[in-house]
Amino acid sequence: MVGPSLTLQDLIEEIRGAKTQAQEREVIQKECAHIRASFRDGDPLQRHRQLAKLLYVHMLGYPAHFGQMECLKLIASPRFTDKRVGYLGAMLLLDERHDAHLLITNSIKNDLSQGIQPVQGLALCTLCTMGSVEMCRDLATEVEKLFLQPSPYVRKKAILTAVHMIRKVPELSNIFLPPCAKLLHERHHGVLLGTITLIMELCERSPEALRHFRKVVPQLVQILRTLVTTGYSTEHSISGVSDPFLQVQILRLLRILGRNHEESSETMNDLLAQVATNTDTSRNAGNAVLFETVLTIMDIRSAAGLRVLAVNILGRFLLNSDKNIRYVALTSLLRLVQSDHSAVQRHRPVVVECLQETDASLSRRALELSLALVNSSNVRAMMQELQAFLESCPPDLRADCASGILLAAERFAPTKRWHIDTILHVLTKAGTHVRDDAVANLTQLIGGAQELHAYSVRRLYSALAEDISQQPLVQVAAWCIGEYGDLLVEGNCEDTEPPQVEEEDILALLETVLQSHMSLPATRGYALTALMKLSTRLQGDNNRIRKVVSIYGSCLDVELQQRAVEYNTLFQKYDHMRAAILEKMPLVERGGARVEEEAKERQTAAQLLEEAAPAPPEPQASKLLDLLDLLDGTPGNTQHPPLLDPSPEGALVNLLDLPCVPLPPAPIPNLKVFEREGVQLNMSFIRPPETPSLLLITVTTTNSSGGDVTHFICQAAVPKSLQLQLQAPSGNTLPAQGGLPITQLFKILNPNKAPLRLKLRLTYNHLGHSVQEIFEVNNLPVETWQ
């Protein structure tokens, strides 16, 4: 038999007193049965009590959807106790996915016009929490009327509701634009803070609003100056800082209004200098205001002296004992290092000290900033600090540190010998963490420095004799010994006392590499080739080398076995050609062939885009052959076999040929599909006349921001009815300030002329952050698929 219904307090006590989850479910099921029965009885006096219990059950994660309609009944009730629980239930149980939320629109409209402040506050809170696009459109004018209410309580809630409406429906901006300027004269803290927030939303979503509110910059400057000098009210001061929340919001609004606008920026320059110099930094509230001031100075067109002051403030943040403040300072300086490099350089010693932080996030940010500060004048000192950090840094930072040192050394090396020493040090300390191209880069560097061949081979031989666990180091050493082993034996080196190395020692060391369980198959290949080359470099007997090579003729690794078999053949059948075949490697220009190939690909893509006139029509049979080879190469360059003799099928195809030449297709307009923090992605389209079902999309990515974009990857997907092929991009790095863009060619085959949709995923590193964006492109021009 079902017991009597519980009060809310008793229900809470019973649920908390349940020993197991099963007991808790039993209590809730019994009480939900009472609540359902009470709802069916329709007792108006008990409805709000039952709904209050149901809301508590909902907060515990149990289903409470059967109370949605009771919320509507309570909201329509004239009693305040019913409305209070009804609106609370609507905020918890209803959202845009339920059609029932539209039924309370009229009730909210009536309550807003009643003039009862508590009821108006409840209606505004509900609208701000779960108001859908339709509700915002219907009630925008009612909310705007409440801006002029005498009660600050209602005005504040109406302004915050307007913020929600602007975020939901940006085109409602024109309704809330006129009263905002009047609200800036408000003295009530909550109303003024809400007004600043509303203006920020309007400016970010409407260019017209941005132009309109740039006229009130002097008024905002005066409000902030009053806050800094005389204070707003003592009740809103925190740790001696006058109303820091309002100061921060005004600074954010000034940053939006002054961005790319000379006149507005000049108006606020003096004020920003005053805030930056007079704010107390001993408390966290003051640091928050100072940080927003720095961000505002850097975003607007501020004076050069003011920007230096902002960088110095961040430098003082680096000395703060709070780790969060130091992290914020490092992140901000990393964003500024491109535009204000000399100002940030003054704080280089403090940044280097931050490398020793025990906090992983701080040391990572300090590493990124230290690498960004390296230039030709400080490269020696910075490399010493970074190499010392490489030896003691955590394992998860070692790869980033090693790669950063190699890139900086390649860019700013004062001499080739210093460059070689730096790379060798990195390979010795963190060889397993370097990039894949480190081996090729070092071998190319050594090969191009003829005067350093003897020095390099001795350094590498000594390093290899001490440690054979670092595979990139072993590979470079094996290559260098194979190329310049004769210099190692001769001892011709600029060192004062070069160590004496015998031929047997060299061969024994390479055999040790071949036999080591730590050696990778690629490393063994380097060592085997080095032994083979030493057969022409050294003067001793080659029988030892022959034996080692013959052993690996039966190796399980196919690549190593093939090399050994070929070398054995060279010994046995072509020994007279061995010296010529194993000559020293010629110097290869850095990236020469690859760069030329990529340049040719980009030139071909550009020619495709510039061609406006169609090619002469081809026979339909040739077009059918094109469809079989669309994804193997550019259609314009495809070579077809000669056509067969006419057949019934060929005659049918010829019947479908039009007797006239088709008109040139209209050019397809370009499309901008992505823009964030200066990174912009544009698409241009072309449909080859000889293959109408093929669409060529050239994706061009540019970077107008102050920081480089690295590790850029663009991936795409299309519906299953289409076929997509992605060509290799022209690069993965976008230099700052409008450098060379990245281009990539998409080939899409759409034989059924289905509506075209693209889903793109962009991943890249920018301004010290890893960015990933996934979005759909549904607004492609109709000409791309019809």
Image (cartoon, rainbow, N blue to C red):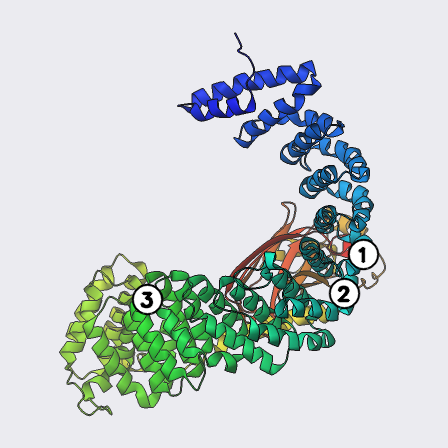
Q: For the residue carrying disc 1, how many other residues have a C-alpha within 10 Å: few (<14), some (14-19), or many (20+)?
A: some
Q: Residue at x 23, y 90 (%)?
A: 493
Provide residue 294's location: percent of width, then percent of height: 57, 71
Query: Which SS class for mark 1?
Result: helix
Label 2 to label 3, Cα distance in Å?
50 Å
Query: Which SS class for mark 2?
Result: helix
Q: Residue furthest top?
A: 1
Provide residue 363's location: percent of width, then percent of height: 39, 66
> Residue 179, labelled with which disc?
1
Residue 746, placed above or below residue 528 = above
> Residue 126, labelled with which disc?
none
Asked whether residue 331 is in view, the answer is yes
In the drawing, does residue 545 fall left or right of residue 338? left
Q: Nearer the viewer, residue 25 or 652?
A: 25
> Residue 213, labelled with which disc?
2
Type of residue at label 3? Cys
Read off the residue under disc 3. Answer: 393
Q: Residue at x 40, y 70 (%)?
A: 403
Q: Residue at x 47, y 69 (%)?
A: 330
Q: Are marks 1 and 2 in contact (CB under 8 Å)?
A: no
Label 1 to label 3, Cα distance in Å?
57 Å
Q: Are marks 2 and 3 in contact (CB under 8 Å)?
A: no
Provide residue 592's location: percent of width, then percent of height: 49, 78
